[in-house]
Amino acid sequence: MQLKYEPIIGLEVHAELLTKSKMFCGCEVVDSITAKPNHYICPVCTGQPGALPVLNKKAVELAVCVGLALDCKIHTESIFARKNYFYPDLPKGYQISQYDQPLAIDGKIQIETEAGIKEVRIRRVHLEEDTGKLSHADGHSFIDYNRSGVPLLEIVTEPDLRSSEEAKAYATKLHAILRYLDVNSGDMEKGVIRFEANVSVREAGSEGLNTRTEIKNLNSFRALVQGADYEIKRQTEIYSRGGIIEQETLGFNEATGKTYSQRGKESAHDYRYFPEPDLPPLVLDSDWIESIRASLPELPEAKTKRFIADFGLTPSEARFLTAELSLADYFERVLAKSKSPAKTVHSWIAGEFMRYVNDSGISIEDITLSPESFAKLIDMTADKVISGNSAKVVFNEMVKNGSNPEQIVQEKGLAQVSDESFIQDAVMKVLNDNPSEVEKYLAGKDTLLQWFMGRVARATKGKADPNVAKELLVKALEERRK
């Protein structure tokens, strides 16, 4: 009998903090993609002899925000340490990080799974500095130290995740929390948040943990899922044929969908951690921590529950809207200006609005469509001033030109008509022009009613009230049956 294996996944998330200056020096934090390489550096962040680090208070404040939002215990005293390893993007030959006395421990995040709500334990949240950036071309390697020393927060889970989808759910939830707190831009394409998956498999039902591998620098949810799935499959196949797993650090090639070996996986003793001699212990005042707690914004979980309770939305509708703070805020601003129910506003946001956002590639923050104008369009549609099809035309004009909906309706003659004589003329013309379809309908092909409705809509240029049109169509068809 073939053994069944289950995956065990823990995640390490590295998130750059939104500070103006670096972690231990006054150098400006810049876009590592667009900024001129090696122009925002100094003796401290390039590790010159004799340069001394000075801790960035804002970075500590943002880190405490995250720890509190993740329900962690914040240590009033934590220690920075030197993590020693030699790599070209690390100019000092060590990274200033936190090890055995981190800033925060014992947090948790709740995620949605197929089996329901699951709690993922967070082992630690600690501060460290980012490394430089390596790039390779034409057989050469290049190093940009602009990113070296940028404040970095590492968030480490316990091995509580049991599938790549659970890992994605956790990463997505954490990404949203960091955005809500405004401590990280969330722009994964620029590498400001990076996932590292520790993956192992074990016989289903067993309790032990087998050898794990670490997949480094996954910079999208898609890469996280694909990388974890490939590694789960690879390890399962090795165990199934009696092989052993080597503890190693892996990269992931998105083009091939496969992991590849980078180096043997280091253990803690390999890094030769010892307290950073140039930095004293980080001591935090309890009152300062509580003042940060009091300033925390409404987080995704709380906002989701409020949307369900106050607006009558379903859990899935509320979760969709609260996945991004900018989307949740826009929804509430539209709803405040609309007389339509929350579910109607949600339908428009999830439908035409998100279609435009996705097709245009524009961010929600940059949308020029005002909540007031959008609310007016939704209400005009609900009041049957215009039809649903005409409303889509008006919406497209609004996002292109910024015009108000009433002006567009007037200029394009899109006002919905309920006049029965006008619609009746269109109905009769459609039926008279399509006798074979009428015969098929009368013979029992009821699905043709929608086809007739489409023809009437076209004949009236979308102006006909669909309810009136349907009523007149059915009546006229039944009369032909007699």
Image (spheres, rainbow, N blue to C red):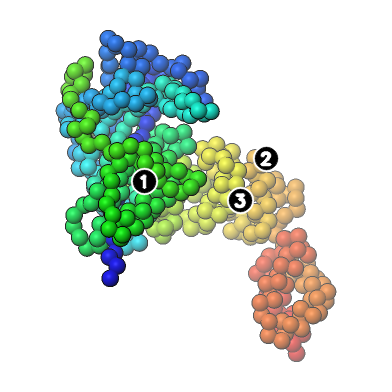
Query: What is the quadrant of residue 441 in the picture?
Result: bottom right
Question: Marks 3 and 1, Cα distance to the nearest angstrom?
Answer: 36 Å
Res. 102 in view: no
Residue 120 is left or right of residue 144, and the answer is left
Quickly name the residue at label 2. Answer: 401
Where disc 3 sits, the SS reads helix
Q: Nearer the viewer, mark 1 or mark 2?
A: 1
Q: Earlier in the sequence, mark 1 or mark 2?
A: 1
Q: Earlier in the sequence, mark 2 or mark 3?
A: 3
Mark 1 and mark 2 residues within 8 Å of each other at the beta carbon: no
Q: Nearer the viewer, mark 2 or mark 3?
A: 2
Residue at 40% over, 48% down: 227
Residue 78 is left or right of residue 130, and the answer is left
Image: 313 above or below 444: above
Residue 271 rendering spot, x and y as whole percentages: 23, 30
- Please name whichever residue, 290 or 30, is drawn nearer the observer in this view of the structure: 30
Where disc 1 sits, the SS reads helix
Res. 262 in view: yes
Question: Marks 1 and 2, Cα distance to the nearest angstrom?
Answer: 37 Å
Residue 361 rendering spot, x and y as whole percentages: 57, 42
Residue type of the residue flagged with mark 2: Asn
Residue type of the residue flagged with mark 1: Ala
Residue 399 rendering spot, x and y as whole percentages: 63, 43
Q: Earlier in the sequence, mark 3 or mark 1?
A: 1
- Please name whichever residue, 285 or 253, is drawn nearer the observer in this view of the structure: 253
Quickly name the residue at label 3. Answer: 377
Mark 3 surroundings: few (<14), some (14-19) or many (≥20) residues within 10 A: many
Quickly name the residue at label 1. Answer: 171
Residue 323 rendering spot, x and y as whole percentages: 42, 47
Position of the C terminus by quadrant = bottom right
Q: How many marks?
A: 3
